[in-house]
Image (tube, grey):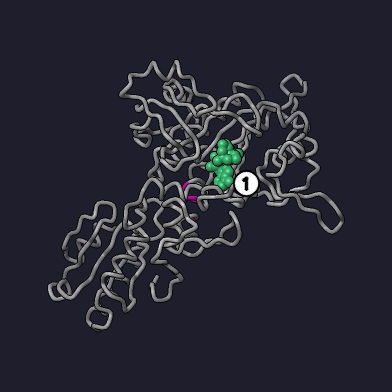
């Protein structure tokens, strides 16, 4: 993509309405614009990151054996009346009346709807287990929408739902999602720690929140430092195997959110291994048994013909919140530092002398080569000062910058900069390209 054609409305000044760095940088880097309180439009750069995060979530859900569906954003109130949550949800639920005076709502979550789908189609235990997910916009009329996409009113969530014949099987589904979540966040370059958590309005008795430690986090959390230091991706996972040992290896070490905090257990940890910090909730998994299957009639016949309400769980990931959370975890004074796996482009190609035909020709060739190699590149072909070009590249945080200036042009070399470390190398074009490939 050529920057002269790209819609990238960057801002020089830090917008006054943004309190935390991720919100400031998302506005400055032209990723989002507010449409109304807690509701955002995603501009091209932001949308690319959102899609990359969504794709990692999708790949990991698929790998764990979860099947993708797509349920609507607008739901009928009927199912929510059956589950009892129509009243419970209170003002956080956006209620809508259609032209026939039917009560509708913009879904804040989908337990009711998916349970109804299941109840209408599945009759026998032989069709179990079932694990379904979708990635869809949600609406919650938060009291205090703030911090940009971190606490929006409209936000993108991945929510999965499991259906099983008994607790042991439901526990296997829970374990799959638990391990899948560890991998999902690690692939985004994040250290997300599963912590014992409260179940809130979703209900149930077994629950973990996945938390990223960050000063701007809204939760108070406590954990053993061992958990922060683990290399999740070093472990190969077979999702058909017994995952209980992996789950135990995490839950056996202390980690809890404020609501579940046990000072006695926490203080048993050596003082220098305790981490007491603020955290961002980037995911939340629940086992809630028959809380929805009973009121909504989701039952199957068992091996002896008896009818059993299915055991369920639900599993959420804050896809749009993750965009902000990743920036909170990875930035410096100059701007965003995207982990390779979620970066909107892999490399920024910077032509420092656009008015020089030889430089333009050389850069056009590099641009063509990168594209031919399938490397996503944002080509700064604007007629701008070098300083402004570097500032833009640092702000938008692409993992690599490939800079072509007059000096390199004479010697046939380019400068390759790694955004994360600031390390720069003068290289021949071929060796620069091979580093990027
Ligand atoms: P929070 O405690 O931040 O209000 P929650 O516990 O109400 O979140 P869940 O019902 O557990 O949220 O939803 C699953 C995930 O959806 C959360 O872990 C979070 O990552 C994301 N999420 C929830 N509310 C919002 C929001 N208002 N804006 C962006 N993401 C959100
Ligand atoms: Mg909430
Ligand atoms: Mg919460
Ligand atoms: Mg939660």
Apparent side of residue 326 relative to residue 198 in the rendered image (left or right): left
Quarter of the rendering occupied by the N terminus: bottom left
- Please state the extent of the stretch shown in magenta in the rendering: 51-56
Please say if 103 is above or below 290.
below
Q: Residue at x 34, y 53 (%)?
A: 337
Q: Which residue is mark 1?
A: 142
View quadrant of ligand 2: top right
**Residue 338 position in % (x across, y down):** 37, 53
- Ligand 1 within 8 Å of disc 1? The answer is yes
Quarter of the rendering occupied by the C terminus: bottom left
**Residue 65 position in % (x across, y down):** 54, 38
Please say if 159 is above or below 261.
below
Specify few, some or many for label 1: CA neighbours under 10 Å numbering under 14, 14-19, or 20 or more: some
Residue 98 drawn in magenta: no
Residue 93 appears in the rendering: yes
Please say if 359 is above or below 284.
below
Q: Residue at x 44, y 68 (%)?
A: 8
What secondary structure is the stretch in magenta mostly built from?
helix
């Amino acid at each position: 993509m050529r920057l002269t054609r790209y819609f990238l409305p960057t801002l020089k000044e830090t917008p006054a309405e943004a309190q935390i760095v991720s919100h400031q940088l998302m506005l400055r880097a032209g990723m989002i614009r507010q449409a109304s309180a807690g509701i955002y439009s995603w501009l091209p750069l932001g949308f690319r990151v959102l899609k990359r995060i969504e794709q990692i979530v999708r790949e990991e859900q698929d790998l764990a054996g979860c099947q993708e569906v797509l349920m609507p954003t607008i739901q009928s109130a009927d199912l929510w009346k059956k589950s009892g949550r129509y009243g419970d949800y209170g003002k956080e639920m956006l209620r809508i009346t259609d032209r026939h005076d039917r009560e509708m709502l913009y879904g804040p979550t989908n337990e009711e709807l998916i349970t109804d789908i299941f109840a209408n189609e599945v009759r026998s235990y032989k069709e179990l287990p079932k694990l379904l997910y979708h990635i869809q916009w949600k609406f919650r009329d938060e009291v205090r929408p703030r911090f940009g996409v971190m606490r929006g009113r409209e936000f993108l969530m991945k929510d999965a739902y499991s259906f099983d014949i008994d607790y042991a099987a439901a526990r296997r589904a829970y374990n799959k999602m638990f391990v899948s979540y560890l991998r999902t966040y690690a692939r985004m370059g994040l250290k997300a720690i599963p912590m014992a958590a409260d179940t809130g309005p979703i209900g149930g008795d077994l629950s973990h929140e996945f938390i990223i430690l960050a000063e701007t986090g809204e939760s108070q959390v406590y954990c053993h430092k061992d958990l922060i230091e683990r290399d999740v991706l070093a472990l190969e996972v077979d999702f058909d195997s017994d995952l209980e040992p992996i789950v135990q290896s995490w839950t056996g070490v202390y980690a809890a959110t404020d609501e579940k905090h046990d000072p006695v257990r926490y203080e048993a940890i050596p003082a220098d291994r305790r981490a007491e910090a603020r955290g961002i909730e980037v995911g939340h998994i629940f086992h809630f048994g028959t809380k929805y299957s009973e009121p909504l009639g989701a039952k199957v016949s068992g091996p002896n013909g008896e009818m059993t309400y299915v055991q369920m769980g639900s599993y959420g990931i804050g896809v749009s919140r993750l965009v902000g959370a990743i920036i909170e975890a990875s930035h410096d004074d100059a701007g965003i530092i995207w982990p390779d796996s979620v970066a909107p482009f892999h490399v920024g190609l910077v032509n420092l002398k656009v008015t020089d035909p030889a430089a333009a020709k050389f850069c056009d060739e590099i641009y063509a080569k990168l594209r031919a190699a399938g490397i996503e590149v944002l080509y700064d072909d604007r007629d701008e000062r070098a300083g402004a070009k570097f500032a833009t590249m640092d702000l938008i945080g692409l993992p690599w910058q490939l800079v072509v200036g007059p000096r390199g042009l004479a010697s046939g070399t380019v400068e390759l900069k790694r955004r994360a470390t600031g390390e720069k190398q003068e290289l021949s074009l071929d060796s620069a390209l091979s580093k990027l490939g």
